[in-house]
Amino acid sequence: MNLSFHIGYRTYRQQKMRVCGSIPELGGGEPVMAKEMACTDGEHWSLQLELPDDIAEIEYHYILTDIDGKVTTEPWDRKHRIVFDRIASSFCLYDYWREEPKNIALYTSAFTKNLFAHNESEPIYEQPDRCLIIRLPNPRVQKNQRVALAGNQACLGHWDTTQAKLLRPCGAAEWEVYLNADEIRYPFEYKFFVCDETKQVCHWEKGSNRVLREAPSETSEITVISEYPYREDLPEWKGAGTVIPVFSLRSEQSFGVGDLHDLQLLIDWAEQTKQCVIQVLPMNDTTRTHTWRDSYPYSAISIYALHPMYISLYDMGILNDPERMAYFREKQITLNNREDVDYEAVERYKTAYCRAFFEQEGVTVLSGNDFKRFWEGNRKWLTPYAAFCYLRDQYRTADFSKWEKDAIYNPLRIDKLCAENGPAYPEIAYVYFLQYVLHTQFQAVSNYARQKGIILKGDLPIGIHRTSVEAWTDTRYFNMNGQAGAPPDDFSAMGQNWSFPTYNWEIMEKDGFAWWKRRFGKMSDYFDSFRIDHILGFFRIWEIPLDYVQGLCGHFRPALPLTVGEIESYGLTFRKEYTSAVIHRKYLSELFGEQTEVVIDHYLSPIDAEHMMLNPFCDTQRKIQALFEGHEDKASRQMQSGLYALANEVLFVEDPYESRKYHPRISASQSYRYQELTEAEKTAFNKLYAYFFYVRHHDFWKATALNRLRPLVATTEMLVCGEDLGMIPDSVHEVMEELHILSLELGRISKAFGQEFSDLKTVPYYSVCTTSTHDMSPLRTWWKEEPQRTQRYAQSVLQGTESTTNECTSKIAEQIITEHLHAHSMLTILPLQDWLAIDDKLRRKDARQERINIPADPDHYWCYRIHISLEQLLQASDFNRKICAMLSRSHRTNTIT
């Protein structure tokens, strides 16, 4: 088989064009082995190959090499592809150098496999002996539309659109048409248009006609011309959706907590209201203690396993024993009558039901071919996860350091533990069974969403729990001596300490970030889009020493800590004591009030006549935490809080990796130590602080993030979004824009310096706009909590609307949502609580019950559940029609008009 490649690209002297492909003859995917092309005029490059006839397909791309060895690849990482689906002696390929299209987000699976998905298995009805195939990328074609080709040829009706040739889908957002090469007369002028099923023109591509001035090949049997993308002349595509944790859903069939059946009902509601996105919170297993403390969805014990509470029991199957079935129905009614989720009761009774069903059907399920295929495809993570669950329950702790011989993961021991003939296998098999049921149910829901044109958007936590499967099996990837968190922000004045280990990124990079790529791959089993929680963690993470409970004395990692010389160059004489927790006696009463003398006598030691420090038995926050464990009275809590604050009284944090280098303590100007500085010292400290946090790391963090995120984003077809709230370096926006990662924009929190509220009409198009997040008060609660600020919002954002009450009325809520729907963002995704706020009949009576999380509280109980069932929501016709109308007016329905 003869195969020729052709590409037009103007090169500089001594530059070479090469083809790098998936077959050995093209380097086997290795750029250094790519095949050099020939060129005589510096622009038209070609390559001839003789290949075996049994090659089925080739993926390839073009690369430029300079004399100095510099390699430039096509900016668009979408590979060229040729499928040899018919026998022919010669193939001739004409390509173009692929730049990234402006509408690149529409080439993600959110569109190609969902909103604008087409049947790629459509047969080819016409294959002439000498064939001219024209291919065209065009992602924005609705399911009831097609791409057509019109032109100045008899076979195309001489521009008669009723005789135009329909293109067939041949790949993700790609279309092709087969023409008889012997019938084409040159010059060949043509143009594409999108039509409906009756060939009525919906819209033409813009610009002048495309032209082939001469025959591409006189002898080739198959000539394939890859055209530049369809030149659409349409308004920017926009959509809308809802965000809600799955556990917060409620239906007549659910069992005290939202489950996968409820998610399917929510898909029905989204379709009915013309929305196109449902965003959920993480759904991974978080079971460490079998208590309510496991309710925190961002603290997973596995990056792969789903939480068993999301199993739809009745979709799984009915118990044969009518008495047991009646017992569980009674428990279901009791749990569903609660306003919130009783996590422990839900786990207890849903586990009992699952075990009963496993006893009844487990042998049959595990012997089936579907299960065997699931197990083979997931065994690498499923086996250690099942062993982890077994050992956790045997030792009554998820802290694997207490698992005696199994404290250090040993694959051979675990394989033996999980062997089918071993004593532990019944429990191991039960874990397999649960994950199989979850997988099959979730895949069914995912497929259902795609059929309905609803994008499921997942949530990727930035961290893992330090007592998780991955921390046990892949220890090398994690720094167990640090704690991940976030610096102080509007959500938490003390910062946040998530207690997760930080990452050893240097080790992760050595294997090409394989761990992260596997995470992304698992997400794509169920989702077509996902949100990277705390995307700032890919730039730098806030790392807190293990001795601290709060987040104030953390530092960014990686970072460029300051030397003593650099600190003193700003005019501040460095003293080592700035890194030790010291406080002036005059401030103690502010922290401890009437307990001041008790604190001085028992917990503090004098350094000099004016200053004091913590005694050794309480000189860290962890020691203080242990001292007051179990003491819940007000006096004890006040004393503990004061001692925590005293432990934060430093101006600099010493870097744990580079000796004699230092980080200014975050928010140090709020400390008592800062108040003791002279005015000159304060001025010097302020200058170095501003330089350190807002200037010094810009290029460093940008390069770090690109190095980590670029290869990860390139491996997924999903639409990638990022949560970029908080203390945001300028480089974050630059990186997200370069990698086409959608940012998060809130109307009530502006990212622009000196601007209180966002101008939603000027936010980036590649962004997600929302009214609130799960870490914030929903609209109605916010309106009550910050009346002065919401009054300013009403006057400045809602076009002069004045709120005469602290109540966020349905009218005000509707105005706020309308403002967000008309944002420039590609997506507006709103919390379900805020959607319900526009309807007086449906909104919750007590808005305070709508809060999902309080970030400042590390022991928060995640138990929010919507107060109405999804069946009721589906029947709320007036409310649903109102949403449809709002989306229609803002041009955010899931159709093109």
Image (spheres, rainbow, N blue to C red):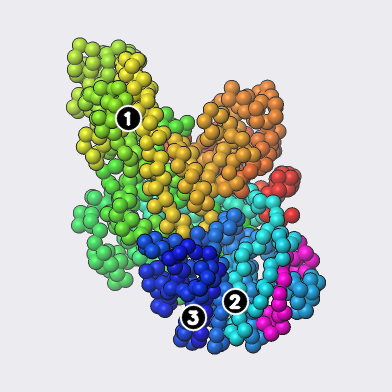
Instruction: Please say if 150 is above or below 744.
Output: below
Residue 714 visible (yes or no): yes
Numbered disc 1: secondary structure: strand
Q: Are marks 1 and 3 in contact (CB under 8 Å)?
A: no
Few, some or many residues within 10 Å of mark 3 (<14, 14–19, 20+): some
The residue located at (41%, 40%) in the rendering is 698
From the image, state whether disc 1 or disc 3 is nearer to you.
3
* Viewer-proximal residue among 784 and 594: 784
State yes or no: residue 664 in magenta: no
Q: Quadrant of the C terminus?
A: bottom right
Tell me the distance, in whole angstroms, between the alpha carbons under discs 3 and 2. Answer: 15 Å
Q: Earlier in the sequence, mark 1 or mark 3?
A: 3
Q: Which residue is mark 1?
A: 664
Q: Position of residue 194 (x, y in %)?
A: 72, 64
Q: Position of residue 449 (x, y in %)?
A: 60, 59
Position of residue 61 in the picture relative to residue 602 (left or right) = right
* Viewer-proximal residue among 64 and 567: 64
Q: Which residue is mark 3?
A: 48
**For residue 752, what is the image quadrant?**
top right
* Viewer-proximal residue among 851 and 718: 718
Few, some or many residues within 10 Å of mark 2 (<14, 14–19, 20+): many
Instruction: Please say if 743 is above or below 81.
Output: above
Instruction: Please say if 862 is above or below 374.
Output: above
State yes or no: residue 189 in magenta: yes
The kind of residue tagged 2 is: Val
The residue located at (73%, 48%) in the rendering is 888
Tell me the distance, in whole angstroms, between the alpha carbons under discs 1 and 2. Answer: 61 Å
Q: Are marks 1 and 2 in contact (CB under 8 Å)?
A: no
Position of residue 397 in the picture relative to residue 190 (left or right) = left
* Stretch of the chain drawn in magenta: 178-202
The residue located at (24%, 30%) in the rendering is 564
Q: Which residue is mark 2?
A: 224
